[in-house]
Amino acid sequence: MPVKVIDHVYAQYILTQLRNRHTSGTDFRKGLVRLGRIVGYEIVKTFPTREVEVETPLGKAIGIDIVGLDRVVIVQILRAAMPFVEGLLKAFPQARLGVVAARRREEGGSVDVEIFYSKIPHIDGDSVLVADPMLATGITMSKAIEEVYRAGRPGRLIVVSVIATPVGIERVLSKYPEAEVFVVAIDPGLNDKAFIVPGLGDAGDRAFLT
């Protein structure tokens, strides 16, 4: 299935703290970092492995190597994704980083997104993780993925979020059916300002106290 909901009990516990409006900005940022690490490890589990032999101080042992950990690019959508990506880097310490900066534009009752800065390393068959804590309408994510394809063709395209909506997932997968989506929760819908309900509020504002 292209959508994986991470139901790990600790991930759900942290998500509950993030949803709580009384959680401080510091604890909110720390929670995003912890979730990024958990989600990262869940993604690592989907990478292929191979058996290898290593020599210990006392002899030889058989273990595994995870194939492709040195071919990962993480693209963060500024600014809310910054602490989330800090956690992802615990699982992918060799990853190269790209950034996409976007702003919402609300005109005539509709919401659109403008990409005003993008810097992504060259991609050639790499596993690309595009991270944004909130996959609401899917517009920002879809435009960020456009920037990814301008940098090359990924071997795997992985969308990483904390909370998504069905409409956001559908928008992304309808345009990029090759994408895999990893989320901690899927919430039912959006309010009239295109924020996820119940969601957790504006992740960027809460993380950076703005």
Image (cartoon, grey):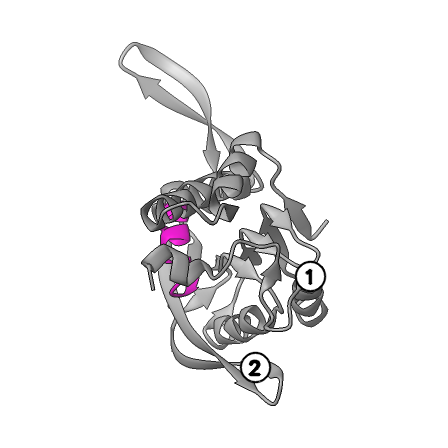
Q: Secondary structure at mark 2?
A: strand
Q: Secondary structure at mark 1?
A: strand
Residue at far front of view: 22
How far from the left and from the top, in percent, is residue 41? 48, 38
- The tag on residue 189 is 1
How far from the left and from the top, in percent, is residue 55? 33, 19
Q: Quick check: 77 left or right of 168? A: left
Q: Quick check: 110 left or right of 63? A: right
- Taking the spot 41% from the left edge, 62% from the top edge, the residue there is 204
Q: Quick check: 1 left or right of 148? A: right
Q: Nearer the viewer, mark 1 or mark 2?
A: 1
Do tag 1 and tag 2 residues touch (Cβ < 8 Å)? no
Predominant secondary structure in magenta?
helix
Q: CA distance from mark 1 to mark 2?
A: 17 Å
- The tag on residue 112 is 2
The stretch of residues the image draws in magenta is 75-89
- The tag on residue 133 is none
Name the N-terminal-most of marks 1 and 2: 2
The answer to which quarter of the image holds residue 46 is: top right
